[in-house]
Amino acid sequence: QVQLVESGGGLVQAGGSLRLSCAASGRTFSRYAMGWFRQAPGMEREFVASISWTGGSSVYADSVKGRFTISRDNAKNMVYLQMNSLKLEDTAVYYCIADLLYRQRPVPNYWGQGTQVTVSS
């Protein structure tokens, strides 16, 4: 069992930056690929980024490539999403996920409760 708790969301102006954090419980954290999804109002949840067990490989959605960076610290059971050059369309609830397999499009085994990111003009 893995429990995920996100933090770091908030209100930011377009062009600004935010760093999301995800704290994971459980001793098996390093066995999971980790990632982020998001859901905007009236839209389906969509993949944002994922990172392999060791952190040596990562994948990004085209919409965030070059602006967002995912990272992890296995010693602290933490995953991060650094978001730069934020756009209005990045407004969404962001969810941390854990997947037993590292793949191009994660199929999450676990979800966090989400953290709201709002980008204003």
Image (cartoon, rainbow, N blue to C red):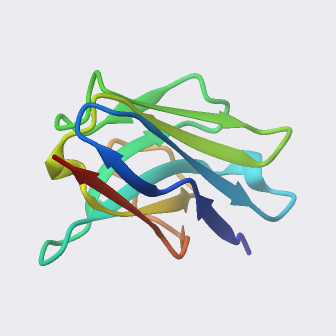
* Rendered view: 14 above or below 101: above
x, y percent for residue 109: 53, 70
Residue 17, quarter of picture: top left
Along the viewing direction, whichever of 93 and 104 lies nearer the viewer? 93
> In screen coordinates, is 104 left or right of 77?
left
User: Residue visible at 59% across and 62% down?
Assistant: 6
Along the viewing direction, whichever of 33 and 7 lies nearer the viewer? 7
State the count of labels.
0
x, y percent for residue 27: 87, 58
Residue 93, quarter of picture: bottom left
x, y percent for residue 56: 58, 22
Along the viewing direction, whichever of 97 and 82 lies nearer the viewer? 82
Quadrant where the N terminus is found in the figure: bottom right
User: Residue visible at 34% across and 33% down?
Assistant: 16
Along the viewing direction, whichever of 54 and 76 lies nearer the viewer? 76
User: Residue visible at 16% across and 48% down?
Assistant: 88
User: Residue visible at 67% across and 31% down?
Assistant: 54
x, y percent for residue 91: 25, 57
* Rendered view: 62 above or below 114: above
> In screen coordinates, is 34 left or right of 47?
right
